[in-house]
Each structure stands twice: as C-alpha cells, then as structure tokens.
Amino acid sequence: MTNTRKLTLVAVLSALSFILMFYQFSFLIDFFKIDLSIIILLALVLLDFKSAVWVTLIRSVLKLALNNKGLETLIGLPINIIGVLVFVLAFAWIWNEEQTHGRFVLATIVGTISLSIAMVLVNYVYAIPLYARFMNYDISKTLGLVHYLAAMVAPFNLIEGVIWAIAFGLIYTLLQPILKKYEK
C-alpha cells in the first residue's frame, strides 16, 4: 500500500471516528459515556498499530478543536485516549497474530480486562483528583472511593469493552468484502 493511500485511510478513519464520538450514550451515571468511535480497530486491521494510534490522536484533536465542552473534554478526553489505546494495544497483541474467531474472542477478553484495569488506575490517579479540584465533585465524599472504582468504574469498562468488541465485530463482518481489497 502506498504512503498516500495509508495517509488517506488514516484521515478517513480519523474523521469517521470523530463523527462517531458524537453518538454516545450515558451508562450508569451521566459522565460514564460509551461512544462507538472504536472503528479505530479498522486502522489496526488495514494498516498497523501505529496507524491506529494516529487515528486515535487525530480524532481526539478534532474533538478538542471542534467539539470542546470545557473541563468535561479536558479531563475526559485524555481518559478516553488512554482507554482506547489500551484496548487497541491488547486487541492487537492477540488478534494481529491470527485473525480467527477464537482469537477475536480472546482479544476481546484481554482487551476488555486491560481496559478495565487501566481505567481504574487512571481514575484513581488522574480523573478523581481533577474532578474534585476543578469541577467541585469529590467522588470520595459522595460515593466512597473504593465503591466508585469497584462498583462503577470497573463494571462500566467491562461493559464498554464488550460493546466495543461487538460493534467492531459487526462492522468488520459487514465490511469484509471491501476490506479484503485493503488488508495488509
């Protein structure tokens, strides 16, 4: 595949992923939002991990520049970037070796568990302190830190990982005839 074609594919997938970020739904509580911008995995399938990272970063810069919601975006977007990259990295590590149904299920499990662990850590170290300081919402006082992380953050991300995998699986299956032309 030529460099021009790669750049074009990265740009198109970044734009599509950015558009899909608009279609999100809240889950559990208002700031737990799931979006289907995980078509970033198509960059992984069609190109490589580096391209998937670029798609993630470009769609995030577009979000920051064109759909910035202030502190919600400034705090939430880095969390989203980390979550997506952890999921994609774990997914790539398993599924890129051999793209079979069994490897897809294993990649989903490893990606989802990795996502959940990473998000518990990121929330503990980054999100909770920033929300408390800048948005006057101290989760430790209202819900309790352990309860929030164990009963809300971890289950939410387990569900999100499964939704991402199902969404990607459907997209990948439906686009299979077209993707055959472009796969590495």
Image (cartoon, rainbow, N blue to C red):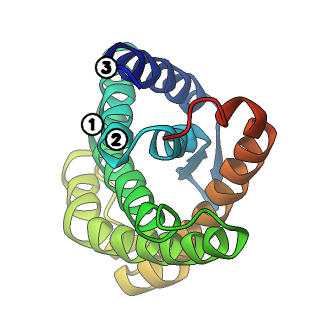
Mark 1 or 3, closer to the camera: 3
Q: Locate residue 114 relative to residue 160 in the image: left or right.
A: left
State the image coordinates of residue 176 (x, y, percent, origin top left): 74, 40
**Front position in the image: 152 or 6:** 6
In which quadrant of the rendered view does residue 177 lie?
top right
Q: Name the residue that disc number 1 marks.
A: 74
Residue at 59% of width from left, 78% of height from top?
106
Q: Name the residue that disc number 2 marks.
A: 77
State the image coordinates of residue 129 (x, y, percent, origin top left): 21, 62
Residue at 51% of width from left, 38% of height from top?
46
Q: Amino acid at mark 1?
A: Leu
Q: Locate residue 147 relative to residue 119 in the image: left or right.
A: right
Q: Which is more N-terminal, label 3 or label 1?
A: 3
What separation in Å lies between label 1 and label 3 (alpha carbons)? 32 Å
What separation in Å lies between label 1 and label 2 (alpha carbons)? 6 Å
In which quadrant of the rendered view does residue 35 lie?
top right
Q: Name the residue that disc number 3 marks.
A: 3
